[in-house]
Each structure stands twice: as C-alpha cells, then as structure tokens.
Image: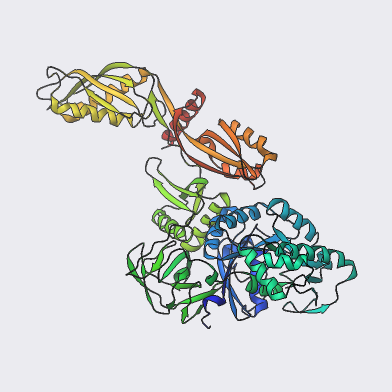
C-alpha cells in the first residue's frame, strides 16, 4: 500500500438515518473502486464495515468503522457511521475526523430524524457535504419527493446534479448534469458499468430544469461566472467544477446525487465527484499550528489483538515504528505496525501524510480523545463534544462471583464508547450505567456477555431519597445497662429543629455545669448523626436539621463514649418522630426538544409524571419545553419520548434539588423500604 500525499487524500464521513443505506454505499464504493475484496450485503452480514457479531445479528451499524477506496490517484478514507440516535456519539466522532460528509437519504424514506440530527452536526462543524439518494431501485423510490423533502427540512441550497432514469424496479440510468451525458447501466454487471446514450426525450424538460438550476446556483457564487452566464456564454467544465468546489466549501451549494448501492449504479460518478469536489487536508486549516498533531477518535477492542487505536493526523508526517508523545498522559508511545483500516482488516503502511487516518494496536497508555504530538512541542486538543447521556439504569450480575468481571468489562466498553459511563453508588448499593437509551443498554449487555463472559441484566435504579424535619421537639435518650460487672450509662436531653433546605446538619453544645463531661459530648453528636443516616419516614438519610444537646447526666464508673453514643441514637429515635418528619425526593431540571405536532402530547406526558412545566420556546425547527420533574418519574423517559415523537424528540436532564414528596408517594416509598428490609 503506497503512502498518499496530503493533496491526494479525502476524508469523508457517511451519515444519515438508520437503514438509509450508508453501510451498503461504503461497501459498494470500496468494491467498485477495486479496493474492496467483495461486494457484501447487509442481509448476508458480509458488508465491509458492519463486521462485529452485534452488527451482523441486528443488521444495522453500531460502531464507527473505516474503509477506503482508491480512485483517480486519490485515496478516499470512508468513515461509516451508525444512523440510530443511541449511537450518535459515533457520528460526532466520525465527523470530527472528516473534512466533508456524504449525507445519505433513502429514496423511499426521505428525510428522517437521523438525517436531521446528522445535518445539524455537519452545520456545527461547517463541513462541506454532498447528498446521495440511495436505493433508487427499491419499490416506491421517488427522487423528486426526496429532493422536495430535503429543501423543506434540511436546506434550500440543495441542487440536483443528476437525474434518475426510471425509479424503483425500472431504475436503469442516470443523467449527469456536469457532463450532459446519460449513463445507461447494464444490469448484472459487477462494477457500475454503463453506456453513454442520448437523453430520452421525456427526460429533456427535467434535465433542462435541473441544469438551469445548477448553472444559475453555481454562477451566482462567482462574479466572473455570473457575467458569462448572463451573457449566454458556455462555461468550461474545469472552471465550472472549481466553482462548485469553492461554493461547497463556502456552504453555498449542496449537490444532490442518486444511485443504487446494491446494483452499484451511480457509484463511479460519486467516486469521481468526491475526488473532484471535496476538500483535501491541504484545503483545511489544522486545529492548531504545531509540527505534529494527531488525535485518537476511536478505540476498538479486537479478539486476539487487543485495543486498536484509530487516529487522524492533522499536521506532520509519521513513519512506521516512530515514537510520538501522548500529551494527556505525558508518555511516549511507539507506533509499531502502523496501518490503515479496510473494515476489520489492517493493512500495514510505511507511513502516513498530514491529514491521513491510520490505526495502530497495543499502545500502552493511550485512550480515545488523546492527542499525539512532539515531546518538545506538546499539544492537547479540546475534548470531542460527545452527546450527554440521557438514560440511566442499574445493572446487576445474574451469577454470583461475576461482580469484578462486570466492573472490568464496563471499563473496557467505556474505552470503546465514551458516550457510555458507569459508576458504583455506595449509597444505593447499585452499579449504575448512563447512556443514550434502551437500544444502547441492550448492546452493552450483549457485549458484556459475548466479550467478557458476564451475564448481566438491567434493573430499575433506586432513588436517593432524603428525609427532613418540619417541626421542633425535645426529649431524652438514656442508655443504661447493668451486666454484673462494669455497666454502661449515658443520658442526654436533645432538641431537634429544621434548618433551611441545603443548610446541612448542625450540632449545638448547650451543656453547662458539667452535667455531661466534655469528652462525651462528641459521642452524643456521633450517635445522632448515625441514627439520622437511617431516617424516620422510610429509612433514608435525614438532612438539614439542628440537634442541640442541653442536659443529661453521667455515672463516674459506668459512663463511656459508647454509652453516650447509644444515648444520642436513642434520643434521636425518641424525638425525631415528633418533629413532623417528611420524605424529600430528588428533582431534575428537564429540557425537551419536540416537533410542534406532538408538543401537546409531550407536555401531557410530563404533567402525568408530576412535572411542573416552566415554559416553552422555539429552538430552530423544534420547540424546547422546560420542566422540573421528580427523578423517580424519569426512568425510561427517553424510550417514551422516542415513541411519542417518532424518534424526533430529545431531552437533557440535570439535578435540580430536593423537594417534599406528596404523602401518597412517601407512604409508597416507606412501604417498599419495609418490604425490602423484611426480605433481607
């Protein structure tokens, strides 16, 4: 495999909704170019970039994956990304490694929620992009409808550059507006072969309409071209192509292509136009000025190989076996067996030029997001802006003794997928996982079993309730025990009173005259705090209260610290129930983005979850709803929202604070706690 110079490299991310045809397109491009070994299919589980057992079983992408196609002395790095929103972190990662994007839209499904989300991510990075209408050979494919859909929901800057001849099973040719040629494809040929034939008469009006749109759109971005266009002059093809490329880089034009990955129709033209129109790394400003900068954007864990690190080189060149400096962990890494990825295969290369994408296995201390650089000129790129977790679940092992394997497996899976986080909550006694939704969690459980032999299941996370006091009271705590020898004696009088929310715990020593020796008073304080941890209402920690010790007595022989600690515990147990104790439930600030047509349903669901709606406001194509909800009501909310909005809605939540729970909720929580302790 030869080393390509920077100007002969194109880094292209393929993005779009799930099942829109991205993986099949990447597979077809590699095959038609001659860089792929076979023409695979989703149905058979043989595509270039969907090669993990999870992806083959589910028949959709889960991971970002890499392939390449060599065309016109240029290497196209093809970055295939998943389409379902549970794996949207992979899309963000892929777009950050790319210089351009091909947004794939199904010829039957049109613009869907995954298309919109991917488009927004491209907008944020100002990436030049192409649109490709896939599956033009499928029943009900409709190019004009998809074009109108794109104009309505994505951008008014879209310009068709191809006209399909026939649609659905009748799809058999494409008119190319750049050349004015009509390509008639030969069914049954292996690699997109076609004959150039005259444009059919019935397609002349549409060809003329689209051709005029394209010429006018391109000419309007260039003063010289607009003059020639208005004067009726013909614009040379080379000038025209260069003008399209400049307009795409400036975000003024998005060309619309079409084809069929299954039949390979239209793929040769797409390969050519990606080379001609998309930017090389030379056309793109590196993130920082330094002699060597590279970033790890993905870590894969492969059987018999270990961790494989995928990285984008932004500046400088590297050679096989070269040492680089990892700025995050301040360590040297040696890039042995430097490779490029063709699906799951790794092809060793002697080196990589600026802008290229490579892989290397078995690095010691390098992780996703880390930066490669020179030791004498260290660089740390900002972290990738991965989406925040929107769902939480508890996970437990089905078989005793697998707890340590569970923690190790979760750690490795987080390394592969940084949008997934986990923690052990000592308060709740549960391992909690945070991610992008139920589909995401299902994938994690499958991988735990397949890769690490851990059999785990999801369960509802417990809620970190609190308790507090609403009234004041006082009383005695007396511990007296005679055992025949030295006894135990501790006696204290305490007052309990509420403090403001968030005020915490305060102990007041009001003992005078030495009725309790100073050395025993901290033990009373300790006993009260210990008892408060077990609460009064439902067994949850009691917070935001003041405890005052104002009287008591002691015995010269039988008193000790343990006796006064017990007196503090008994005093709390006697007094706290008289202080109108209440249960506090954690609340979350929730922001929900929803299409207007289901706004009422979304707000109704929030209200049914005891949510307080704070307001709504337009936010781009969606409406943002702000609300405060009890945390207990948010379990599996992402799934419900997905169902209500047909996948178009998203949400974000943050801890808000604690508030008094309604009596019926408190009674239910107390009963559950009692049952749990009875079983235990």
Q: Nearer the viewer, residue 401 or 598?
A: 598
Q: Nearer the viewer, residue 18 or 441?
A: 18
Q: Nearer the viewer, residue 510 or 46?
A: 510
| Residue at x-position 45% and y-position 71% | 315
Q: Quadrant of residue 564?
A: top left
Picture coordinates of residue 107, whole percent (x, y): 75, 60
Position of 182 compared to 643: left or right?
right
Q: Quadrant of residue 52?
A: bottom right
Query: In the image, is residue 430 above or below residue 83?
Result: above
Position of 205 compared to 461: left or right?
right
Seen as rendered, the residue at the extreme left is 556
Question: What colouring does the structure picture have?
Answer: rainbow
| Residue at x-position 45% and y-position 28% | 659
| Residue at x-position 75% and y-position 64% | 214
Picture coordinates of residue 593, whole percent (x, y): 60, 42
Picture coordinates of residue 608, whole percent (x, y): 60, 31
In which quadrant is the C terminus drawn? top left
Query: In the image, is residue 279 above or below residue 385?
Result: below
Picture coordinates of residue 297, whole percent (x, y): 48, 64
Seen as rendered, the residue at the extreme right is 201
Q: Quadrant of residue 288?
A: bottom left
């Amino acid at each position: 495999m030869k080393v390509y110079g920077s100007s002969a490299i194109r880094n292209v991310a393929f993005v779009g909704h799930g099942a829109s045809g991205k993986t099949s397109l990447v597979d077809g491009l590699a095959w038609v170019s001659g860089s792929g070994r076979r023409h695979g299919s989703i149905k058979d589980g043989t595509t270039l970039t969907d090669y993990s057992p999870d992806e083959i079983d589910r028949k959709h992408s889960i991971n970002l994956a890499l392939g390449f196609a060599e065309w016109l002395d240029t290497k196209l790095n093809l970055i295939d990304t998943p389409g379902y929103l549970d794996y949207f972190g992979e899309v963000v990662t892929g777009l950050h490694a790319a210089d351009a994007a091909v947004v794939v839209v199904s010829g039957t499904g049109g613009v869907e929620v995954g298309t919109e989300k991917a488009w927004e991510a491209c907008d944020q990075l100002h990436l030049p992009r192409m649109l490709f209408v896939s599956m033009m050979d499928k029943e009900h494919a409709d190019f004009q409808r998809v074009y109108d859909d794109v104009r309505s929901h994505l951008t008014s800057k879209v310009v068709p550059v191809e006209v399909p001849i026939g649609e659905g099973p009748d799809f058999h040719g494409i008119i190319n507006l750049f050349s004015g040629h009509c390509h008639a494809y030969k069914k049954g040929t292996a690699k997109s072969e076609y004959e150039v034939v005259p444009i059919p008469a019935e397609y002349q009006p549409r060809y003329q309409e689209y051709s005029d749109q394209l010429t006018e759109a391109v000419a309007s971005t260039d003063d010289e071209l607009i003059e020639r266009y208005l004067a009726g002059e013909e614009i040379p093809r080379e000038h025209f192509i260069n003008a399209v490329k400049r307009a795409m880089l400036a975000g003024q034009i998005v060309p619309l292509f079409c084809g069929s990955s299954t039949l390979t129709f239209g793929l040769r033209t797409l390969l050519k136009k990606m080379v001609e129109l998309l930017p090389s790394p030379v056309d793109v400003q590196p993130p920082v000025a330094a002699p060597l900068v590279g970033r790890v954007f993905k870590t894969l864990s492969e059987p018999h190989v270990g961790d494989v690190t995928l990285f984008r080189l932004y500046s400088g060149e590297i050679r096989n076996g070269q040492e680089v400096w990892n700025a995050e962990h301040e360590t040297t890494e040696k890039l042995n067996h430097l490779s490029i990825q063709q699906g799951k295969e790794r092809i060793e290369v002697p080196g990589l030029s600026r802008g290229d994408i490579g892989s290397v296995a078995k690095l010691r201390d390098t992780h996703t997001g880390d930066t490669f650089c020179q030791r004498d000129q260290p660089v740390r790129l900002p972290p990738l802006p991965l989406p925040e977790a929107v769902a939480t679940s508890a996970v437990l092992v089905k078989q005793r003794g697998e707890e340590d394997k569970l923690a190790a497996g979760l750690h490795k899976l987080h390394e592969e997928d940084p949008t997934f986080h986990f923690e052990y909550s000592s308060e709740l006694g549960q391992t909690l996982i945070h991610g992008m939704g139920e589909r995401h969690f299902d994938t994690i459980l499958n991988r735990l079993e397949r890769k690490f032999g851990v059999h785990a299941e999801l369960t509802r996370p417990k809620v970190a309730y609190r308790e507090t006091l609403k009234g004041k009271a006082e009383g005695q705590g007396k511990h007296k025990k005679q055992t025949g020898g030295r006894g135990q004696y501790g006696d204290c009088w305490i007052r309990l009173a509420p403090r403001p929310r968030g005020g915490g715990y305060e102990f007041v020593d009001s003992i005078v005259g030495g009725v309790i020796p100073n050395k025993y008073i901290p033990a009373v304080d300790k006993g009260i705090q210990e008892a408060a941890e077990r609460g009064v209402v439902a067994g949850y920690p009691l917070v935001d209260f003041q405890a005052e010790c104002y009287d008591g007595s002691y015995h010269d022989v039988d008193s000790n610290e343990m006796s006064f600690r017990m007196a503090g515990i008994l005093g709390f147990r006697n007094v706290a129930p008289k202080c109108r104790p209440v249960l506090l439930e954690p609340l979350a600030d929730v922001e929900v983005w929803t299409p207007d047509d289901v706004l009422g349903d979304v707000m109704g669901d929030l209200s049914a979850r005891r949510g307080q709606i704070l307001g709504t406001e337009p936010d781009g194509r969606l409406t943002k709803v702000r609300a405060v909800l009890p945390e207990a009501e948010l379990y599996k909310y992402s799934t419900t929202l997905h169902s209500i909005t047909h996948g178009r809605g998203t949400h974000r939540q943050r801890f808000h604070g604690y508030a008094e729970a309604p009596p019926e909720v408190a009674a239910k929580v107390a009963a559950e706690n009692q049952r749990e302790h009875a079983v235990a």
